[in-house]
Structure formats: structure tokens, C-alpha cells
């Protein structure tokens, strides 16, 4: 079990209970004798006899162990497991608690201003994290508190290294995108970036107005020691190998993304020069996440024609309103049914005024579009 | 980071870490070095696949865009939607353009102006 695959998915929690139970039922004769001898020393003749008499029924599955009996077995069996197996239990138990820390940092929406804060807060959470909730293992003398603390430090170190790697990869992706998109007007595109490690989204639509000022996350050294030093070093090495692979894969993604982004923007500029209208949508897998980009091209000629139409319509509406107002005051149109006529004229004036208002709003938007796409 | 070329994969750092770890036997070190080399091969394979995919996608799109441009030049109004899969994701372009017989809107504008003028003249 490694940290990366657990952080990516949400696997079932490792069960120390079932692991130790399995070890108990698959122990060789000599080990089983030692376990039962310890069981006798700790719990006396009665429980020991019950254990011996019921062992085969438990093993075959005819009878299940009670909670009390299993608790006693859990206290005895780990003392006769190899260091490797004991470390396996410790590793899986602690990684579960590290995952709960990681899950709390996921699924956030941020702006470019908040990127540093996002990563710095997570780093601070890692540093302060002490909740392993494994005192029952200390109580049952499966592990000492020092052993738990030492491996917790190793897990925190590995998580911090992964966070640093993700932060560096996100920086590279965002700097690349900003450099490429700088020649495109703001407002013409919508963009967002999904950070893989944090499963969080950053809105980049206003990236041209933003100046990146990345900080450096805290890094720490670690010197594994204690009973499980050798296994901890092995674990760190496995994690480093995976991070090394991720970093190289990130380099490949960066390179390919850069070329694809160049091509994408090239298509945008070509479409613009051809005076066509287009919507270009793309997603790019980068080093540390995915970039989603939508670019819109509008025909300036069409915008100008729409502008001319709009002005003409406004002029026509003004003329109509003026005509109705004039008709209202003109004696030629006075009839016996004057109130009805006046009411109808007023309704007509209000309707045309509403159309005039809508047209003015439309014209304002056209002006903005001309400024944006011009 | 250079946009224009993939950097050479430098395994010196990870090999250095491997050799500095005590308790590793010669066999362990050898196995790990093989794993590093194997990862390198895997990365190169991924890189080649992605680069090839991008190049094919770009070539296909440019061919289609060329044909659309030719249609535009023939005086046709074209509406198209293309989706391609590149090495780094997907790319979709929805485009419309071409000759829309702009004389018609010009005539409409002229008509409106004439009608407005008539209204003003016959108003009194």
C-alpha cells in the first residue's frame, strides 16, 4: 500500500483486526504454541482451555470469535509477528489517518490570489497533525508510542514532499499558461485550472490582470530511526521512486501541453484574421493538473453591422414615440372617445419606450463586444 | 523549464538516494536501478505516444480548416464543429463564417431610412 494510490482514490480502510486474525489462524505450530502460552500467562487456565478447544471451530468458520476473545488474541499475536508484518500494520493504520487529513484539504475553489494560501495552509496542517488515534495499540502493547510517533513523522514528511512537488508543478503550469495567453484580450476567454493533488479548482479568467508571486513551502529533513528504521527507509524510497516517475511524467505533459497550447492559440489567431466567428474549447493535461480553456472569436464586421442596425432601430423608435406624443396633442385626432384614444396612445408610447430601452442596453453590450474583440 | 524540448531525464539524484540508503543489499540496489531504468523507458513511451497523437490531431485539423477556407472563398457560408484528441487532452472548434450576402442588410437599412424620411415629410 502506498500513499499516492490512497490519496488518489478512497480505498477501504485496512483492518488490523482481520489481518491479525488471519495471522493467528495461519501461524505455524511453534508460533501458535508461543501465542497460547502467552495467552495462558495473561488470562489464566479457563480462557486458555476455551481457546484451545474452540481454535479449530474458529479456523474453519463454524464459530466466530467473540469481541473479548478477539481483543485478547490481538494483544498476543503481534508480539510474535516479524518486524516486517508489524510495520505493515503500523503503516496501514497511520496512512488511513493521513488520508483523513488529505481529504479535508480537497474540493476547494480558489482564485489566483489564493493559491499560495491554499498550499501554505495545507503545509501548516501537516506540521500540526498528530491525530493518529492509535492509543489502543499502545494500550494493547502492539506498538509503543515512540514507534507510532516515529512513523507518523515519516508519513508527514512524505506528504509534505508530495505537496511540494504538486505546488511546483502547479506553478510551472500557471506560469506557462500566463505567458501564452498574455497576447489575448481579457474577457475573450474563460479558463480554469484543476489541481490534481488537491482536487481543487482555480479560476484563471482574469489571469492577465494577476501577477504571480509564489512562495516557498517549508521543507523538512528526516532521519528515520527506531525499530522500524529499515522499513521506514524502504517506504520513503518507494514513495520517492513514485514521485520521481510523477515528476518525469509531469515534464512530458508540460512539453506536450506547451505545443498543443501554441497550436490552439494559433488556430484562434487564424480564425480571427479570417473574420469568422468561432468558439474554441480545449482541455490540457499539464504537470500538476488540467487546464480548461474557452476562447471566443466574433466577427467585427458583424458586430459593426449589428451596431448600425441598433442605431437605426433606436432612431426609428424615437420617431415613433415623437409621432405618438404629437398625435396626442393634435386636435385633428380629437374624437368623442378621447379617453380611450389617449389610453391607447399612452400604452403604445410605453411599449415603444420599453423597446427603446432594450435596444439601448443591446447597443451598450455591442459597444463592449467591439472593445473586447476589436 | 524549456518549452521547446524535453529535458534529458536525469536519474543521478534518485540513484544517489538509492546508494546512500543503508541496509540495501547489492541485489536490492540492482533491482531498484532496473526499476528506475524501466520507468525511464515507460516515460519515453508515454512521451512518444503523446507527441505523435498531437501531431496527427494537428495535421487532421489543419487539413479540415484548409477545406473550410476553400469553401469560404467559393462564397459559401460554412458552419462546422470539429473535435480532436491531442496528446494533452481534447480540442473542439465550432466555427461559422463566409459570405452572408450582405447586400440584403444594406437594403434593409436604406429602406428604414427612406420610411423615416417619408414619415417626417408627410407628418404635417
Image: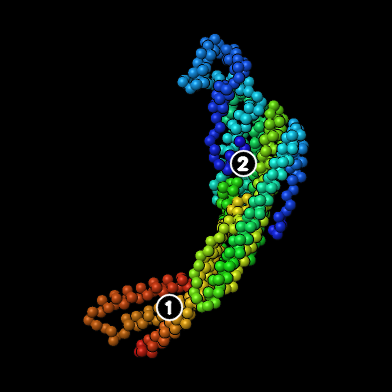
The quarter in which the N terminus of chain A is drawn is top right
**Residue A299 location in percent, x, y?**
53, 73
Q: Residue at x 73, y 53 (%)?
A: B7
Q: Quadrant of residue A131?
A: top right
Would you say residue A45 is visible in this rendering? yes
Secondary structure of residue under mark 1: helix
Q: Compared to B26, does A209 lie above or below?
A: below
Give residue A131's mark.
Answer: none
The residue where tag 1 is placed is A313
Chain letter belonging to callout 2:
A
* Whether residue A167 is situated above or below residue B80 in the rendered picture: above
Q: Position of residue A90 (x, y in %)?
A: 62, 29
Residue drawn at x 69%, y 44% is: B38
Pointer 2 local density, CA inside 10 Å: few below 14, some 14–19, many at least 20? some
Categorize mark 1 by other alpha carbons within 10 Å: few (<14), some (14-19), many (20+). some
Q: Which residue is mark 2?
A: A4
Alpha carbon of mark 2 to alpha carbon of mark 1: how far?
63 Å
Give whichever of A132, B90 is nearer the camera: B90
Amino acid at each position: 500500500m502506498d500513499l499516492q494510490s490512497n490519496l488518489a482514490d478512497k480505498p477501504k480502510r485496512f483492518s488490523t483486526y482481520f489481518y491479525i486474525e488471519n495471522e493467528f489462524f495461519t501461524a505455524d505450530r511453534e508460533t501458535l504454541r508461543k501465542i497460547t502460552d502467552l495467552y495462558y500467562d495473561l488470562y489464566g487456565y479457563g480462557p486458555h482451555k476455551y481457546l484451545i478447544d474452540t481454535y479449530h471451530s474458529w479456523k474453519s468458520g463454524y464459530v466466530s470469535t467473540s469481541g473479548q476473545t478477539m481483543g485478547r488474541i490481538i494483544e498476543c499475536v503481534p508480539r510474535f509477528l516479524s518486524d516486517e508484518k508489524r510495520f505493515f500494520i503500523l503503516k496501514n493504520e497511520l496512512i488511513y489517518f493521513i488520508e483523513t487529513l488529505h481529504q479535508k484539504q480537497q474540493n476547494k475553489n480558489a482564485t489566483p490570489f489564493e493559491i499560495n494560501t491554499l498550499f501554505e495552509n495545507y503545509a501548516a496542517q501537516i506540521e500540526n497533525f498528530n491525530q493518529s488515534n492509535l492509543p489502543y495499540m499502545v494500550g494493547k502493547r502492539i506498538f509503543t508510542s515512540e514507534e507510532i510517533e516515529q512513523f507518523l513523522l515519516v508519513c508527514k514528511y512524505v506528504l509534505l514532499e508530495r505537496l511540494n512537488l504538486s505546488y511546483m508543478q502547479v506553478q510551472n503550469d500557471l506560469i506557462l499558461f500566463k505567458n501564452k495567453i498574455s497576447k489575448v484580450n481579457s474577457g475573450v476567454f474563460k479558463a480554469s485550472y484543476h489541481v490534481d493533488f488537491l482536487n481543487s479548482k482555480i479560476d484563471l479568467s482574469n489571469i492577465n490582470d494577476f501577477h504571480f508571486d509564489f512562495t516557498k513551502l517549508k521543507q523538512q529533513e528526516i532521519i528515520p530511526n527506531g525499530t522500524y528504521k529499515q522499513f521506514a527507509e524502504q517506504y520513503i524510497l518507494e514513495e520517492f521512486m513514485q514521485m520521481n516517475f510523477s515528476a518525469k511524467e509531469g515534464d512530458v505533459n508540460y512539453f506536450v501541453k506547451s505545443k498543443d497550447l501554441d497550436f490552439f492559440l494559433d488556430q484562434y489567431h487564424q480564425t480571427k484574421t479570417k473574420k469568422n466567428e468561432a468558439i474554441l474549447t480545449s482541455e490540457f493535461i499539464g504537470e500538476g493538473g488540467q487546464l480548461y480553456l474557452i476562447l471566443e472569436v466574433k466577427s467585427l464586421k458583424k458586430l459593426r453591422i449589428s451596431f448600425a442596425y441598433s442605431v437605426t432601430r433606436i432612431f426609428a423608435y424615437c420617431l415613433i414615440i415623437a409621432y405618438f406624443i404629437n398625435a396626442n396633442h393634435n386636435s385633428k385626432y380629437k374624437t368623442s372617445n378621447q379617453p380611450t384614444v389617449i389610453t391607447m396612445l399612452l400604452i403604445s408610447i410605453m411599449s415603444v419606450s420599453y423597446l427603446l430601452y432594450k435596444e439601448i442596453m443591446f447597443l451598450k453590450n455591442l459597444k463592449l463586444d467591439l472593445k473586447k474583440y476589436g | 523549464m524549456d518549452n521547446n524540448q524535453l529535458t534529458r531525464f536525469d536519474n543521478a539524484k534518485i540513484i544517489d538516494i538509492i546508494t546512500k540508503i543503508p541496509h540495501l543489499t547489492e541485489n536490492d540496489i540492482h533491482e531498484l536501478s532496473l526499476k528506475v531504468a524501466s520507468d525511464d523507458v515507460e516515460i519515453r513511451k508515454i512521451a512518444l505516444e503523446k507527441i505523435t497523437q498531437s501531431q496527427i490531431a494537428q495535421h487532421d485539423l489543419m487539413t479540415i480548416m484548409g477545406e473550410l477556407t476553400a469553401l469560404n472563398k467559393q462564397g459559401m457560408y460554412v458552419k462546422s464543429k470539429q473535435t480532436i484528441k491531442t496528446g494533452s487532452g481534447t480540442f473542439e472548434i465550432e466555427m461559422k463564417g463566409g459570405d452572408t450576402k450582405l447586400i440584403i442588410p444594406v437594403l434593409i437599412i436604406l429602406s428604414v431610412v427612406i420610411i423615416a424620411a417619408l414619415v417626417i415629410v408627410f407628418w404635417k
